[in-house]
Image (cartoon, rainbow, N blue to C red):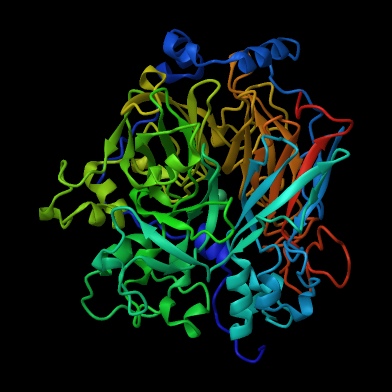
Amino acid sequence: MTDHFSQKIFPTTQLEDADGDGHNTSLNPTMGEIIGKRFSRRGFLQGSLAVSAIAATVGPAALLSAQEARANGGSAFSFPEVEAGVDATHHVAEGYDADILLRWGDAIFADAPEFDPTKQTAAAQERQFGYNNDYVGFIPLDGSAEHGLLVVNHEYTNPHLMFPGLVTIVDGKIEQGKLSKDQVDVEMAAHGGTIVEIRKVDGKWQVVPEGKYNRRITANTEMRLTGPVAGHDRVKTSADATGTKVIGTLNNCAGGVTPWGTYIMAEENFHGYFSGELPADHAEAANYKRYGVPDSGYDWANFYDRFDLAKEPNEPNRFGWIVEVDVMDPNSVPKKRTALGRTKHEGAESIVAKNGKVVFYLGDDERFDYVYKFVTDGTYNPNDRAANMDLLDAGTLYVAKFNEDGTMQWLPLVHGEGPLTAENGFASQADVLIETRRAGDLVGATKMDRPEDVQPNGVNGKVYVMLTNNSKRKADQVDAANPRAANAFGHIIEIEEDGGDFTATSGKWEVLLKCGDPSVAEVGATFSTETTKNGWFGMPDNCAVDAAGRLWVSTDGNSNKATGRTDGLWAVDTEGDARATSKLFFRVPVGAEMCGPLFTPDDETVFVAVQHPGDGGEDWDGHGRPSYYEDLSTRWPDFKDDMPVRPAVVAITKIGGGKIGV
Ligand code: FEO
Ligand code: CA
Ligand code: CA
């Protein structure tokens, strides 16, 4: 299929790092003033320590880490830092093993065919690990930290790295051919998620291909819409008159594991899969414009009508949801939980509040879009798993407004309240949820610099918001929570909910870190002076809080050109004098993004996901060059001439055992 080339660029850049201005044209105010000195790091810390309710949430694990911190120059972390840089492989801190656990094409079932990249089929792919691993979760079996289900999202596909014979080089640039139906079918089977049993044997993690819960979820897996949008006319199609039965999940980026042990897959850049034109004057035109639909990043509409707006104009309303999977039943139908809203969901990390309600924090990853949280109506029952299985169908969705004075409000997106009325085109809560972004516009949410992971920390009671970057923010659009114009390197916000109550509708916030090279004054980065030249980073994306309450941040967008380093996993101090000190623990091979990360409950393993290695226009010694199947910038992790580069999940453990980073 090399005889017919389209002009498109790759979905990697097209969907996630798109150079557009975002799709938020609302008039929500920007505040125009850089945050004042009174919100300096230390001032806020003193204030927060005075709040006894927060101190009460600090558990023994945090106190232990504080003792360790005193013995380690104030930092809660102790490991030899990795040197930042760019080359063809990964690097982990000395004293640790980084073992490849699962690569694209590895067997998820005992009967899976051996991976042959020159003859890949959809049938084989459905039995094998998918492409571009992103979220990683661990659900213990029998309460063990050494035996459980690994759940992994497969966000998207990179055809130019996956398929031979698809690319030609024209004027030094890649042109990618149109995909055949067989290739599209492989792509669809390489999307979605993997549920696979894993076990630690003699200190090393192994996949259990015979695991009875093992499952692949793909772009063709049948799902149910549940909650307020289920059955609504706006989600009915010619294939589904009920408005409840959806085929597949798309672009599952980050996610979560609920307190009751289900797997959350967040649908992010769903707009890229749709092509074609809506019928003239179609009622969904404004809705789709707000979400950038269609984007035509994939060739799927050439073969499947559901991705063609001209034929199935309602189909995009069936994507952009939070999907919940019952991993204990491999035949369960995944549920799209519409009560949590429809956005380009980065993830959905959760925590049980003091009153037993469960709070999910949600980022909508696009320039100038919003941070959300969802609070369940019902309460979590730790003694009855079945009683929790539909908690996500009823609750309140809130959007964040960050005020200039360091306070914030969570504004409810509830039909009939404030502007969310029929006069403004919302006939019911279903309309509010289908057009979550417009609801956020109308209530006056704060336009953020690409909200990615939002992670509650049960040890210190705070919440961490990763904001990747926003090169399109202009000087007159700067506000306290997004304090830099042309924000190339992103920042991290720390939220403290009022009263230490995760269900609170107001709180305080401050910027934990402005990212980028602190040695370049114009960048305005705020890493501590203890942070080395290896320790700073740009573009925070995913993050994890370990059992001791320590923050680990992974990145998307570092490169030779951007920061002189690959993406990686950094340990970031949040407490005491070491606050805003960062250290590099692991770095990825050239072209990759760092996803995961996920700690086992004993903190003795961190799983990380190396996504899209070998992608992009740089090789390991910094010269610009195209990278594609026949001429790759790296063949990580196999380094064999007949094996292409492969996204993979890596298990990092301490040599000889023990907790990570201690
Ligand atoms: Fe798929 Fe927002 O990263
Ligand atoms: Ca991400
Ligand atoms: Ca990302």
Q: Which of 292 and 659 is in front in this view?
A: 659
Looking at the picture, how far across and down is residue 316, in whole percent?
37, 68
Residue 92: which quarter of the image? top right
Task: Please state the horizontal and vertical placement of residue 403, each as a whole percent of the image.
Answer: 32, 29
Q: In which quarter of the image is residue 637?
A: bottom right
Vertical side of 299 occupied by 550: above or below: above
Does residue 71 appear left or right of residue 434 in this picture?
A: right
Dividing the image into 4 quarters, which one contains the N terminus?
bottom right
Residue lying farthest left? Answer: 423
Q: Which residue lies furthest to the bottom in this view?
A: 3
Does 246 sit left or right of 534 as displayed?
A: left
* Vertical position of residue 71 compared to residue 33: above or below: above
Q: Image check: 340 left or right of 193?
A: left
Q: Is residue 534 visible?
A: no
295 and 502: which is toward the camera: 502
Q: Look at 46% across and 50% down and name the residue there.
A: 365
Q: Image quarter for residue 570? A: top right
Horizontal side, residue 165 vs residue 420: left or right:
right
Q: Position of residue 46 (x, y in %)?
A: 48, 10
- Using the image, determine if residue 525 lies above or below residue 91: above
Residue shown at the point (41%, 35%) measured from the top left: 359
User: Where does the image place residue 562, in percent across and percent down from the top left?
Assistant: 64, 49
Q: Mark yes or no: residue 88 visible.
A: yes
